[in-house]
Structure formats: structure tokens, C-alpha cells
Image (cartoon, helix red, strand yellow):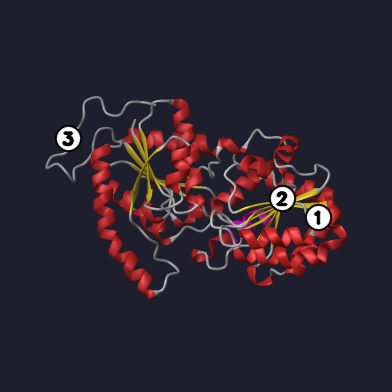
Amino acid sequence: MKAIIAGGGTGGHLFPAVALAEELRSRTTDLPLLFVGVEGGVEASLLAARGFEFEGIRASGLQGKRLLSRLRSLMLIPSGLIRSLSILRGFRPDVVVGFGGYASAAVVLSAVLARVPTVIHEQNAVPGLANRWLGKIVDRVAVAFEGASDFFPESKVRVTGNPVRTELFGVSRAEAVTRLDLDPDRLTILIFGGSQGAHRLNEAVMEALPMLADEREQIQFIHATGPRDCAAVRQGYDTGGYRAVVEPFFQAMAAVYAAADFCVCRAGAGTVVELCALGKPSVLVPFPFAANDHQRYNAEAVVASGGARMVPDRELSGAAMAEIIRTFLRDREGLEAMARRAKALAKPDAAIRLADLVIQTARRAPGVRFSLFNRDLRREAGGCRHV
């Protein structure tokens, strides 16, 4: 079997795709597999570090953009389709899996036109417009949240959960705090806003520090700021005399998660699923301008179980942040209960379920490929090789 995995633009789209690739490779180490994503996106360097082949296409999103940006995005669609078809013709996959992101739609649509079996995976509780449309024409739709099934044809949809990277597991808290040079007896708060950081979170934490002076010796921070705010946030912790590890972005998230007692973060689908898989209590601050307000729905799914608290972006302040930290500092048992409830929502076999679905879809129509490039539909002898 040969597979193309399309998606990226953000870590939330990319990391579940990596988890699927890891599962497929664990079954057949020499599996021909190609990632396709956005030129200049986060995926190129992250995938290279993991030894995966990558091809980029020019693409940009439409939702939430101003008119001029939308026009520019629309102008990229024809070249994105042509580039995608060229990649398909060269690689000749048995299946294409789309994970969302700007490049995914062009690749998946090209695969449908070329009659290559297709699967899309929707990570969010409320699907975006592109996946809702693609769900009508692809072969199978995998969803992370049960409620997302309602947006797709019943005969096509499967609830698989959201795959989580295996690299996030296997690090103990003791090992992690040693690696990060932290105090094992302090409450450790992890602040992050996704691969691009979150300015509002950074501001709220900096505003909270003077209000937490009495608790300074009992708490410590791990903070992924994004590139813009890193220097200012480091200076803020140093000025306040706080113990903190501050970076624009943490590549080795396993140790970062393992050291954290609770997290303050946005509510992207990948983040929410990782928190549940690792049993991490959290304060979720949904990004208010996310398409279809999907981050709020993602957060609500965890909050309803008691595994997280949600603070709307408009209510986030230094005073609110300080009070949250004080509450959790006093109530360690409550934190442990939140951790258990978050863990109960996890689907640890999500990568296995999705890999099974991908393989089944590839076998569904073996050998019928690339009618777009050939006048007759040619069936290759023997069809697809089994994984």
C-alpha cells in the first residue's frame, strides 16, 4: 500500500497526521508514505526531523479573512489543484488521507477526481466548511468527537477519536522536572497557545505575577510564548523573581506535559485530545475567532465531564489567572479529580482505529486509479499490497 497524508498549516492538523503515519509505519516499516502540506508551513521542518518525505503546495485559508486575502486565497486554488494532481500522478497512491488545513482540500479533491480512495479526518467537535463539503464526495469520514458525526453522511462516518503522537508518552514527572531544572515540590503551571503562541495568554500571565507574590515560592511555570513575546515574558518572570522555563515553542512536548500539574491553553482539537490522553487538568481559553467557534465546542466537551475549566477570552485577565492558580494551589485533590475525568475521555486506540479504516478504504477499490490521466480505467494486476 502507498499512502499520501495531506494537511498541516498548524500543529493541530499535523500532529494527528503524524500519529497515523507512526501507526502505519509500525505495521510495515518500508511503507511508501508521503506528506503533502503548505509551502513554508510548520510541517516541513517537523516532518523532516521525524524522517518523513514532504511535498509542499501553495495554499491559504478563506474563513475569517478580509476580502483581499480571500481573493488571494481563491487565486491559489487552480495552481494548488494542478500541483496536487502532479504529486498524485508521480507518487500513485492507493489512498489519500486528509487532515484539514489549507493544503488538504486541494489534495483530497484531486484524489477524488483521480478516483483514488479517500479518507478525511475531522479533529474538531464542529467541522469546518471544507470538510463538510468534502464529506459528501470522499469514501470515508473519520471524526474525533461523536457529535461531529451529525455533519456527515451516516453511511460514511466512523468515530475513531483523534490520534495522539506516541512520543508524548513514557516520560515520568520526576524525570521531566529534572530535565527542565525545576523544583519537584512546586505546583507547575504549563502555559501555551499552540504552535503560534497566544498573545492574550501571555499578557494575562504577566499581569497575574504581581498578584501572586505571596505564592511565588510555591509555584513555577513552563511557558511557550510564540516568537513575538518570548523576550518580554522571560523578563517578566525574571523581574518578578519567579522560577520559569520560557521558550518560543517546545519541540520536546513529552517532558513539558509530564512536568505540568495543570495547563492553561487554547482549545484546539489536538491540544484537547493530548490533554485527555495524558490525563492533564486544564483551563481552556478558546480562541474567539476560530472558524465556526469550534474551539469553544471542543472545550465544552471536556468541561462537561469535569476534566477542565473554560474561561472565555473576553473574561481572561490577570486577576482571573491569579485566582485560578491560587484555587488549584489550595486544592490539589481537585486537580487530581480533574485529571481522572480528563483521562476518562481519551480514546487511546484512536490511531489504530484510523489506520484500520485507511487500510480498509485502500482495499475497497484496488487498482482503479488515475482515470483523469488515462482515457481508460486501467486495473493494475494484483491491486494494492496489504499492509
Tell which circle, 3 or 2, labels the residue nearer the N-terminal end: 2
Q: Is residue 322 visible?
A: yes
- Extreme-left residue of the structure: 375
Q: Nearer the viewer, residue 256 or 262?
A: 256
Left or right? Give the position of 263 relative to 87.
right
Which secondary structure lies at badge 1? helix
Q: Which residues are magenta?
A: 296-306
Tell which circle, 1 or 2, labels the residue nearer the N-terminal end: 2
3D distance between C-alphas at marks 1 and 2: 10 Å
Question: Which residue is identified by label 2?
Answer: 281
Q: What's the residue at 38%, 60% (across, down)?
A: 60
Q: Main secondary structure of the magenta part?
A: helix
Q: What's the residue at 37%, 75% (across, down)?
A: 67
Which secondary structure lies at badge 3? loop
Q: Position of residue 294 (x, y in %)?
A: 54, 61
Q: What's the residue at 35%, 36% (across, down)?
A: 3
Label disc, if present, on residue 378 of the rendered structure:
3
Q: How many marks?
A: 3
Number of other residues with Cα within 10 Å of mark 2, as a class: few under 14, some 14 to 19, many 20 or more: many
Number of other residues with Cα within 10 Å of mark 1, as a class: few under 14, some 14 to 19, many 20 or more: some
Left or right? Give the position of 30 relative to 311.
left
